[in-house]
Image: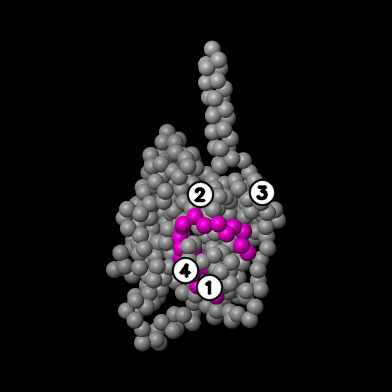
Amino acid sequence: MKKHAWAVLYTIALTAFTTYISLDTFVLARSYNTNATDINTAMFSGMEVSSGISDSIKQDNTDQDTTDGSEKRKHSRNKHPGGWSKDSGFPEKFKDRKAPDDSESTEDSNAPSDNESANNSESTTTSEYTGETSYKDENVTIELTTYDEYDTKIYVADVTLTSAEYLKTAFAEDTYGKNVTDTTSDIAEKNGAILAVNGDYYGARESGYVIRNGVVYRDSVNGSDVLCIYANGSMEVVKDSEYTADELLEKGVWQAFSFGPALVEDSEIAVSTNTKVDREMSSNPRTAIGVIDENHFVFVVSDGRTSESEGLSLYELATFMEKLGVETAYNLDGGGSSTMYFNGQVVNNPTTSGKIKEREVSDIVFIS
């Protein structure tokens, strides 16, 4: 009898502990730094601003002493975003095609999500983005284009800045913490973003560098590829074993993300057909960011998990980014998190639990 009682107590205690761990990992919010809105603008002091994409294109046309690799990059850059050449391997722009009927419904595919499963019986209705496709002021130029590749809708925002100071990040609820979340669109609106995509969902992990707007929030390592966006508008991917977070800050890192993997490095695809995130190797919604030249970025989001849009593998995403002409590209959080916001609207069709719905995330990358 006594042994049975101890077994019951042990089972109850184990269940309670397991429940707490699950809640602590995925649900319970912890605020480590409220009002986390600091911006270290000091790193831009004395830095020359970029004259924009027009000068880079002019340089492409006049510079004859280049290596084969740089010639390849310049050829790709001259084609984008004005339209792909017929022999580029890309189909026509999706925005030039007939938009789907609003009454059409699609079912999510049975591809598993990261931390959630799609409900295959849930019918969803998709709608084509009907807002503006460009924005320009004295410091920011954005061109939005949608492609249909790999049976997937892919949304590309081509961004040219006079300074990387206009490429910013923000936390949900302006709070650095664990499981503090909001939708990409809500965070974007609160921060006056013109363009935004979801970030690396840092709050779901206990480790991995977090440097945002020139401020170090987390300096613990997790062995991941770290995306470094520098104040001079360049971008590279490093291992967290190579530098401490403070050393990266000293090197001029403006933003650092710990998700990955690197998709393109030195203009070459950096993943294989077997590369996966955790246990996920199938086609999924994806979010990525790449750099073509200093202060010339591309933000890329793909739909997925519906019969209309299958989603991308990491290799397919890397191939697409490479064809955009990027020198470096990096995979951010995907699945239900993948969201692009532009001029007050959600551009893509994010899927959460089988529905066209935004998932709440920890952070965003945005242009303002």
Please tell me which of labels 2 and 3 falls first in the chain.
3
| Inter-mark Cα distance, 1 to 2 | 26 Å
The amino acid type found where label 2 is placed reads: Ser
Please tell me which of labels 2 and 4 falls first in the chain.
4
145 vs 269, nearest the viewer: 269
Q: Secondary structure at mark 3?
A: strand
Does the segment drawn in magenta span residue 223?
A: yes
Rendered image quadrant of residue 323: bottom left
State yes or no: discs 1 and 4 in contact (Cβ < 8 Å).
no
Magenta span: predominant SS is strand
The amino acid type found where label 4 is placed reads: Glu
Q: Secondary structure at mark 1?
A: loop
The image position of residue 38, as x and y in percent, is 68, 63
State yes or no: discs 3 and 4 in contact (Cβ < 8 Å).
no
Using the image, determine if residue 44 lies above or below residue 38: below
Q: Which residue is mark 1?
A: 233
Q: Which residue is mark 3?
A: 31
The amino acid type found where label 3 is placed reads: Ser
Region rendered in magenta: 215-239
Rendered image quadrant of residue 156: bottom left
| Inter-mark Cα distance, 3 to 1 | 31 Å
Q: Which residue is mark 2?
A: 337
Using the image, determine if residue 66 lies above or below residue 36: below
Using the image, determine if residue 316 lies above or below residue 15: below
The amino acid type found where label 1 is placed reads: Gly
Q: Which residue is mark 4?
A: 236
Q: Residue furthest top?
A: 1
Q: Nearer the viewer, mark 3 or mark 1?
A: 3
